Every structure is written in structure tokens, then in C-alpha cells.
Image (cartoon, coloured by chain):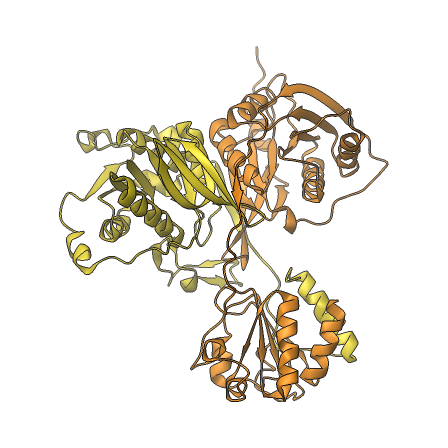
Amino acid sequence: MRIVVCVKRVYDPKTIRVSRSREELDLREAVKITNPADRYALEAALRLREVAGGEVIAVTVDEPAAEDTAHEAVAIGADRAVLITGPELAAASGATITRLIAAAVERLAPVDLVLTGQMGLTDGTGSLAPRLAAALDWPVTLDAVRLEPADGELVAQTRTVSANLASRRLPLPAVVAVAACPARPRYPHPARIANAWEPGLVEIWSVSDPAAGAGQGLGLEPAALAADTEPAGLILGPERVRGQVIGGTLEEAAATVVGLLKARRVI
Amino acid sequence: MEMDLSYLEALMGGAAAEAAGATGGVWVVSAEGAVDDGILRLVGKARVVADALGSYVYLLQSGSLQLAGSADADQAQAAIHAGADNVLLASGVPTLADLTEFFRQRAPQAILFPRIPLGRVLGPGLAQTLGGGLCGYAADVTVDPIYLRIVAHQPILEDAARQAVSLVATPAVVVVDTAALPAAFNEPWRSGNIEETGLVWAAPPVYPTAELPAAPLTLANADVVVAAGRGLKDAAGFALAERLAAALGGVVAGDLAALDAGWITDEQLVGLTGQSVAPKLYLALGIRGDTGHLMAIEGARTVIAVQPDPSAAIVPVADYNVLADPKEFAGALLAALK
């Protein structure tokens, strides 16, 4: 079974500050980390490989600095990794990134399964898996917590709204978004960390450069890279005010607190 | 000779000429089950958006629905009272290919999906097949008054802020968390059309389900932490904290005083020598707040502190303070929660 795992970097939310005066995110000290949700997807892929054999390939679409993330995926256990990069990516939309990954999946054929994380940690919307399924015309399932191969098909246990498990049989090839699940992502073995930087384990493909060498460019037209969305500012809620005192009798105060809990959707 | 519309299009943000035969409109897709409150809220939001665009609201309602049944006719009527101009009924659950074909013929301006499993799959898929702009997770939808574009408000950083995303490409596809929307309209004077499309899509798939063993609530994953401190005085006071935690669906914790009293175990200790917590709500009962404790609750979204002393260290740190005897207040809060 050949499994492609989509990994990406996100800003570590602990390092992002929100600037109220400028009404924007202050990213000067922000650090990018591998999306934790994608590590669950990688873990699911490695467990599948342990059962069914085959190959796990990590794919990431990002600037050249993301090569570390590709090496990290190899260190954790992927057989190899592909970094798709290029200056055109600066304004790339979700649709474009989807098409790039779909093109990479076609080039890596025959791929049986594409795994993604459920959602980007900082600003994710969880739209990559359904987008990829649409682009590849493959079946898709979200919220998977456990994957098992079953004679040429895949049995995905997914979390339902009522917090039950639904067991779903998917014909392969398929796209699956993996939710945070009991299978905790493993840490890389030190020896694998050392070996992950050996040449040949991470391939770097160019987005559109036809001169990138045989089989190295994905050949996407510049017109396909136009942005379909643009940021329109940051909306900040009311500033947190500490030290407020709730007055009144005990019953009045309790009623006020219940109102606060309802407004915050705690109850 | 054809009129040069380029200047007008620049002025109108490219919306001057609408495709021939297109109905445009703001669509809400309810493809799974009944018209529930979430769908009605979404229809209300679509109404507001359509009014700003000068457009109509369409609700595509499918599922195991037959108009003959009076309950379903009532549902369609409820959607019209909530703001829909047209309710289109189909049977079965559409696949992505079905929906793509459906919307190719109708050239919508915007398509809104509720953030349910089916909407999360169909919304992004539709944006990919139709080449539209997408916001896969929005808490609100507005309209840019200059360019007449849909603007989705996407929660980021666990809803600490919202990123406004202007959807340039049409159709604008937005997957909306309906729980975050204001209450649905119910305006009986509204009228609209109910149309049977005659479309029959595949029956909804049924998957075998199994009970998921519930993950045990811990200090790390609980949304609500009720912390007990010296001010609760005795075991009966601590029992109130436990009952409050159960009533709020959270876990009980405590400070060093609670540990010393034997009410809690090491694992439940919040503080410098215990654990740091980051729940949505931290309710501190009878805790004055030493430095280590206050450091450990820095990540909490809302802190409510109940203790009688206005000069206690926790007062300026907590979002809300109730300056009262924590035992009495816990009893009053339990009564108010019932």
C-alpha cells in the first residue's frame, strides 16, 4: 500500500501575538511548527504500513525553509518526502495547493491512500481532504480515528456527531482526514533523526518551472495560481477586562454567573 | 457594436454582467435530514447577505423528504418565515457530482453549508469543482459593501480573533458554524415559493456504528475546571465543588490547601508544583491565589473567582469576582443551574 501523507507547517499559536492597535496578528516572534494534526495522520499511515506493508511518502507544499518539516517526517518514519516549492506559492490559494498535491499524487502513482490532518492548528478550516477528494475524484471520509486494511479496501472508524464510532468501508484509492485519536504520534528515533538528512530522502519539486529538470516541475500554469480569496482584516472581540466584581445578593450573583456561562456556551 | 462595460465592471467589482440564464442568488444547502434550528439560522444569515447584495435566498432541502407529508411542508414554511424566498425540495443525499451539476446550471453568487459532516465534505469539494472561493470554517458571513463580495469571518487561534476572508472568486462557498449565528427569524408575513425539483439522489448511506468509549475527563482536556481552596472550609464545602463540577460537565481541582486537607490528589493540584490548566472556564472557590497558582491558570479563557476578600491576589487576575462566602455561593449557583 502506497500512502501519501500531507504535512504542513503552521504558526505555533503560543508564539503569535494579537496586536490590537494595528488590528493584525503580530508574527514577528512567531515560530512555525509541523501541524500537530498532520502528525496524527503520519502516525495513522505508519500504523497502516506496519499492518499492510508498503510505503509512506510525506508531501508538503511550502517555501524552501519547510524542508526541515519534510526531513522531520522522514525521521518520524516516512520512507521519503517531497517538498513542492516555488516563488509562485506566495499568493497560492487553497484550490491551487490542492491541485499541486493532486498533481504530485498522480506523479507518485500508484497511490492507494492520501491522509491529511483534520485541521490546521492556527487558522485551519479542514478543507484540504474534501478538496483533494474532489480534485482526484476519490471517496473521502473525515474524522477518522482508526484505519484498517480489509481485502483491497479500507475500514475507517470515524467519530460521529453523537460521539459514537461509525465504521465505514472505503474503496481504495481514497482520501482520509485523521482526527486526534488514541493513537498518539510517535517521536522520532535518534538514529532516524541522524539519517533523515541523507541525500535522496527528500525530493524538491518546483511548482511551475519547466527548466527544473526531468520530472522535477509540476507544470502548473501561472494563471492557475491566482488567488480566489484575500484577507480582509482581523476582527477582534472586546478586550478582556479583568478584575470585574459581580455584586448583588447571592441569588442575583448566581443568576449573573449563569448568564455569563450561557453567553460563553459553557452550559 | 458592443458596449464597453470595462469601466462599469471595474466600478462594480466585475459583477456588472451576469451570465445569461443564471439565477444567481444566495443558496443554503441542507442535504442531511430535517430543517433544524441551525438551518433556519443559516437561512436568516443568507437573508441578511442577500439583502445586502440585492439578491434572493434559495434553500436546497434534500434528505428523506416528501412534500406530501404535512410535517415537511411545515418545515419548508418555517424556512420561508426564516427568510428563504425559494425552497427547492429533492429526495436523497446528493453526491459532490450531483451538487456540482445542480449548481453549474444555476450560477449562484454564494452557497452556504452548515458545518455538519456532510457540509464539511460537500462545501470544500464544491469550491474545488466550481472554482469558487472558499471559507471552510466561518462563524459569520457579511458583505463587502464596495465590491459586493462575500466576506467570511473565520475563527483563528481557538476563536481568540476572527480573520475576515474576502471571497473573490464566485461562487463564494462558506461552511458556517451555525451555533455561532444569531437566532433565526420567524416572520410569518414572509412568503415564498416551494418547488419540487423532482431530483432523486441516492439514499443516505447507513454505516454500522459502535459506542465510542468516552475519553476520561482530565484537568488537561476538560472545558470546565472547578477549583477548591481553603475558603470552602470543610469536606462538605468540597462536596459542593464536586457537585458544581458535575453540573457544569467539568472536573474538580484544587490548590495546595485542598491538597493538604486531603480533598484532592496530586494529579488534581493546580499550581507551580502541580499542573497548569487552560480550560474555557476556571471557577475558583475559596482561593485567594498565590503566585504559583495564578501562573498555572494563565491559559484559562475565563476565570471566575469566589472568595470574600476584595484585596486577595486573585481579584485583579480573575475576569469576574464574586466577593462572597464560597460555600454559600456554590449552593446558590447549584440552585440557579437547576
Left or right: where does residue A27 sit relative to residue B22? left
> Who is closer to the viewer here, B29 or B319?
B29
Identify the residue shown where x is 47% and y is 78%. B295
Q: Is residue B242 above or below residue A39?
A: below
User: What hue represents chain B?
Assistant: orange
Q: The C terminus of chain B lies in which quarter of the figure?
A: bottom right
Q: How many marks?
A: 0
Q: Position of residue B33 (x, y in %)?
A: 65, 35
Q: Position of residue A98 (x, y in %)?
A: 39, 35
The answer to which quarter of the image holds residue B86 is top right
The answer to which quarter of the image holds residue B83 is top right
Residue A31 appears in the picture as rendered: yes
Q: Position of residue B332 (x, y in %)?
A: 75, 76
Residue A85 appears in the picture as rendered: no
Identify the residue shown where x is 65% and y is 89%. B309
Q: The N terminus of chain B lies in which quarter of the figure?
A: top right
Q: Position of residue B176 (x, y in %)?
A: 60, 43
Q: Is residue A99 above or below residue B319?
A: above
Report the chain shown in yellow: A
Q: Seen from this angle, which residue lies furthest top?
A: B1
Identify the residue shown where x is 32% and y is 43%. A48
Q: Seen from this angle, which residue lies furthest left?
A: A199
Left or right: where does residue A201 sit relative to residue B21? left
Identify the residue shown where x is 51% and y is 36%. B121
Q: Is residue B107 above or below residue A199?
A: above
Q: Is residue B20 above or below residue A158?
A: above
